[in-house]
């Protein structure tokens, strides 16, 4: 970090820094400043050396620097960088709290502190420096600066030697690009200020005068709207336009649509007015395009547009709201029934059978269809409830009982298939692991611990390879992390001999276990229905079949999800290890740990043993 | 393992074993057998040396041994123990498949193989040995043996030198306890056999003859029932008793109750009979005592006892079934309404508001109460549906809107409290970890790597301590594992300075995160309802508050659930480590890995980022 040069200079600088530190500690700012200027040491050090001390002694600092140009020099050189951690490291054993005002930026802290000190000391004298503190801020406060210049012109201070508005503006133009300043002067809606800036700039009066005159002729709110729009400050523009009365509402609506300022617009108009309603309708249209039909429906409904709301709700399967809107219209009974049937059909497609049944029963008044929907969805108890409610016990014989027998067959076959696949994968996993371990040990014996191929054959290596893609950033959005996991899974191939076959098998085994574990509620309901209708034989087969499947999978957990994989592998020691293999396994451990998604595959899925599903009468 | 004695004997035995192996390999069973008998070498070795060879050469083996007493000697000495892995280890480099018939016990395999060989060669000659093979089985087949003796008596074989029934029975009595044999002979229901055994025994005819005569006088099924009951074979007893007709049903019911043979009993009687119904009622009573009221209800309902079923269902909150049973009775409308109210009250206590509302609405015909239940349960959309269905928009103003405003207040306050606790725990966790790490390094520097106290201060040690209680058995029942986890959690104290404070904090943080994450659905529903009723201001506060809480917690995940804890800690290397500390951390790794429940605390709870809850119109 030190500049290249002859030894003398290098030595000199180190001594100088020591000297500077002593001076700064004893508040000799003037000496420090001059020395730093001469030797071209970054002026940030004045603050960085001990921020707290400078902030608490601002007035001393200003008094000692005395000259405005000195203060401005310090201000212009201000940077967010902490020079004591980059250019001029502190000597060891010295410790200073570097960030006294937490959360705020250093530059802003210094600017605000300097300005407040200067304004309390002599605002006229330090006028240009005050301007500088506004301009230097992280988000430059150009309008405030302009406002101060404007005030200076309106009320020139009587103090002798005070800077003139002319000079101040010139100075501002030296600090800031003229076009920026012009735009910002427009943003103050103060035409005197605008003219002042325009005159000082090299702008052509033929260009800006007609525009300014046009603006001057407008009603205040519309004028401000026009300026805001010109400056692309659309929110402010809308705010002003909303005050311009009904005749400009069309324009406002246009602006809202163009700039998608719907939410803001709704806040600006009274909720019971026609304009609010028009805005709501536009917003709803936009939301429909954005696939947010339900929210569109809410907006339409609350502003008194139940027909539109009904459509929006219906298209988003928000069936309860759709029905309410329909009853508010109110839809005639036959059309309500038709609507209910439409909604029920959609819900059935989404396998939401209970909701579909409610619609069919209560709004389409078709209890038979409702019961059939429940039977299709295996919602046995609710189906029976409707059967009794509507006194349709005939359906028990014609549909419910046959469906129960079919369900028990389907479930049994499904269970058998799951158990078979689980067993096959588990057996294969043991083979793959043995092969990998054998290959790894062979490799280590042959080539010693430095052999890079050896790790290809360790179980841990699959984990590492997998995690490579998921380490970089922990704050990725949920969407991208979802995609990433999907991509990772794609790499897991169950094909025999694929490089990550072991992990693919673990993943597949976990999926099967979770699927079978999730069947508890459904099996419980089915068993009860079977018993009720005296299908004891079928129930007596299903219950032990499901229990065996659960037990088999639970017993396989420690075998499939080895504990040694969940944590890192322990160093490989034992009667069969060689010095080389121990060294190699030790080196493997020093690589970064597996990251989240990879670790997930290595943790066994949880079984919900708390969910009781067995019937005592079948045991 | 070798017997103590003079050197000569020891030497001798080793040589003898080598000789025996050679003989057995060349099928010289006779020589082997005699040598083993003489030198008192365990006869099991005949089989254990190479099971497959003996099984494939059974006839040769029998022919060479020739004498029945030799075969019996071999049989009586048979044990499950594999002598080649206990008494007579194989020489190295020899390998034999020890268990040719997998799953079956060795003794059973040998007995069955020997018997089948002998019976094919000369069943009369080897009769006593055949009996021995039955008696020697893991579960002795006494009845089969007795049956064979009985047959011998009925049809004495003409073959010369064949053993007589008399002799055979005598031999059996020599092998088996006389009382066992008598009981088993009874179990064959063959009185000739019984008498034969009784006569051979020292039993007093005055004792057994009256009993046998009484039995003989009974009808066959009742006779067999009496014998089974005498022998405590209650299932068989019930089976026979069920065939004895109605006059014995009372006795059967008694037996079923005493021995809790309900399920078996139901299988023995026709489902449409009065006896089936009586059994079902008894079973239901038993199930009620066992807190299985719902299953009791199913039994009562299906056997045509809807009143009893209704009570059972009602007491287990199985409300759908209760209502169906009530309608089957059928209960008069006013009583049905009363029942519905009772059930609804119970469900409300269980916070099952939607179900309570259904009962109140559809069966108690009290839509107002139903709507209020839904509002209490924050089931906003469904409440609105009923409001529109029953045209009770007045409730919107009087109850729904005030409840919405209260809910948004409650949720906001709850969120704030959760966030505050989370932040406090997180800060404290950082402090505890720093202290532990510091204490650990200090300890290592002072005392070197062998200091046993050092590990008390490592984060990993908390894990180890916790896992001590949960390693032993992976096949514990779900209940005991639940209790165990509860006990483990009790040890986690949040009190400052408690030994596992860090883990207690992680556990508490995980609980908060899960709780807040679970609010997604409820917040989503509340936001929609707020927007619908134009409470935009409240919604616009709740949405960012909840979002910030979720983001804050998600961002804290990598900090709280350090990756280095999820896996084992990597060896501690780096600029601050000493040779001692590296050694110590390396040694720590060799201890057993953390087991499941302990590892769970170290894994961050999953956040359900897939559950979309935000409203676009509030962003």
Image: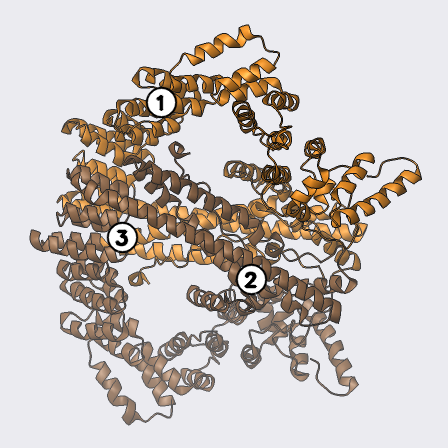
Chain colours: A brown, B orange
| Gap between marks 2 and 1 measured at Cα | 56 Å
Give the labeled residue for mark 1. Answer: B242
Task: Please identify the quadrant where the C terminus of chain B is shown.
Answer: bottom left
Could you tell me which residue is drawn at 15 percent across and 45 percent down? A367
The answer as to whether the residues below labels 3 and 1 share one chain is no
N-terminal label among 3 and 2: 3
Numbered label attached to residue A352: 3
Give above or below for A491 relative to B568. Answer: below
In this view, the residue farthest toward the right is B7
- CA distance for labels 3 and 1: 48 Å
The chain carrying label 1 is B
Task: Reply above or below: B531 against B275.
Answer: below
- Is residue A122 or residue B246 the one in the foreground? B246
- Residue that protrudes farthest toward the top in the picture: B206
Lateral position of residue B597 relative to residue B263, left or right: right
Residue B202: which quarter of the image?
top right
Q: What residue is disc 2 on?
A: A502
Viewer-proximal residue, B494 or A242?
B494
Q: What element carries label 1?
A: loop
The reply to whether the C-beta atoms of the residues labelled 3 and 1 are less than 8 Å apart is no
Disc 3/disc 2 C-alpha distance (Å): 37 Å
Task: Output the chain of dot 3.
Answer: A
* Residue A448 in view here: no
């Amino acid at each position: 970090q030190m500049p290249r040069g002859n030894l003398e200079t290098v030595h000199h600088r180190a001594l100088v820094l020591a000297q500077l530190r002593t001076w700064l500690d004893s508040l000799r700012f003037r000496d420090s400043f001059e020395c730093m200027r001469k030797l071209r040491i970054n002026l940030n050090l004045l603050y960085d050396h001990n921020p707290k001390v400078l902030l608490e002694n601002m007035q001393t600092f200003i008094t000692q620097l005395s000259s405005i140009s000195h203060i401005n020099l310090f201000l212009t050189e201000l940077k967010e960088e902490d020079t004591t951690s980059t250019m001029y490291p502190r000597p060891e054993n010295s410790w200073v709290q570097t960030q006294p005002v937490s959360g705020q930026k250093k530059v802003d802290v210094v600017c605000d502190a300097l300005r407040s000190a200067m304004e309390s000391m002599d605002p006229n004298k330090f006028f240009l420096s005050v301007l500088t503190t506004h301009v230097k801020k992280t988000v430059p406060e150009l309008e405030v600066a302009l406002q101060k210049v404007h005030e200076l012109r309106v009320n020139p201070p009587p103090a002798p030697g005070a800077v003139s508005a002319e000079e101040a503006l010139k100075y501002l133009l030296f600090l800031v690009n003229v076009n920026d300043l012009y735009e910002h002067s427009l943003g103050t809606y103060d035409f005197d200020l605008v003219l002042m800036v325009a005159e000082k700039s090299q702008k052509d009066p033929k260009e800006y005068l007609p525009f300014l005159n046009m603006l001057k002729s407008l009603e205040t709110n519309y004028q401000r709207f026009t300026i805001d729009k010109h400056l692309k400050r659309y929110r402010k523009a809308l705010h002003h336009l909303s005050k311009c009365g009904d005749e400009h509402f069309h324009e406002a609506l246009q602006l809202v649509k163009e700039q998608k300022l719907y939410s803001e617009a709704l806040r600006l108009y009274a909720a019971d007015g026609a304009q609010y309603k028009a805005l709501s309708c536009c917003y709803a249209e936009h939301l429909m395009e954005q696939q947010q039909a339900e929210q569109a429906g809410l907006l339409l409904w609350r502003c008194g547009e139940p027909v539109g709301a009904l459509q929006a709700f219906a298209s988003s399967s928000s069936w309860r709201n759709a029905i309410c809107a329909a009853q508010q219209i109110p839809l005639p009974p036959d059309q309500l029934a038709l609507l209910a049937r439409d909604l029920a059909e959609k819900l059935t497609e989404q396998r939401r059978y209970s909701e579909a049944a409610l619609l069919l029963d209560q709004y389409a008044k078709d209890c038979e269809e409702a019961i059939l929907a429940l039977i299709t969805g295996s919602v046995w108890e609710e189906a029976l409830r409707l059967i009794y409610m509507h006194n349709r016990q005939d359906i028990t014989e014609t549909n419910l009982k046959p469906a129960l027998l079919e369900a028990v067959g389907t479930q049994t076959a499904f269970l058998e298939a799951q158990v078979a696949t689980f067993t096959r994968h588990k057996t294969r996993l043991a083979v793959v692991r043995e092969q990998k371990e054998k290959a790894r040990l062979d490799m280590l014996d042959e080539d010693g611990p430095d052999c890079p191929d050896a790790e290809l054959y360790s179980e841990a290596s699959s984990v590492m390879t997998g995690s490579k893609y998921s380490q970089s950033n922990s704050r990725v959005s949920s969407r991208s992390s979802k995609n990433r996991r999907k991509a990772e899974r794609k790499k897991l191939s169950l094909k025999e001999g694929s490089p990550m076959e072991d992990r693919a098998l673990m993943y597949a085994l976990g999926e099967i276990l979770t699927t079978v574990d999730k069947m508890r509620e459904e099996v419980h309901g089915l068993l009860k229905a079977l018993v009720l209708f005296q299908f004891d034989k079928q129930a007596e087969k299903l219950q032990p079949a499901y229990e065996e499947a659960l037990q088999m999978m639970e017993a396989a957990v420690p075998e499939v999800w080895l504990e040694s994989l969940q944590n890192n592998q322990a160093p490989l020691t034992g009667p069969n290890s060689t010095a080389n293999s121990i060294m190699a396994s030790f080196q493997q451990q020093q690589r970064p740990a597996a990251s989240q998604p990879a670790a997930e595959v290595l943790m066994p899925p949880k079984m919900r043993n708390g969910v009781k599903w067995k019937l005592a009468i079948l045991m």
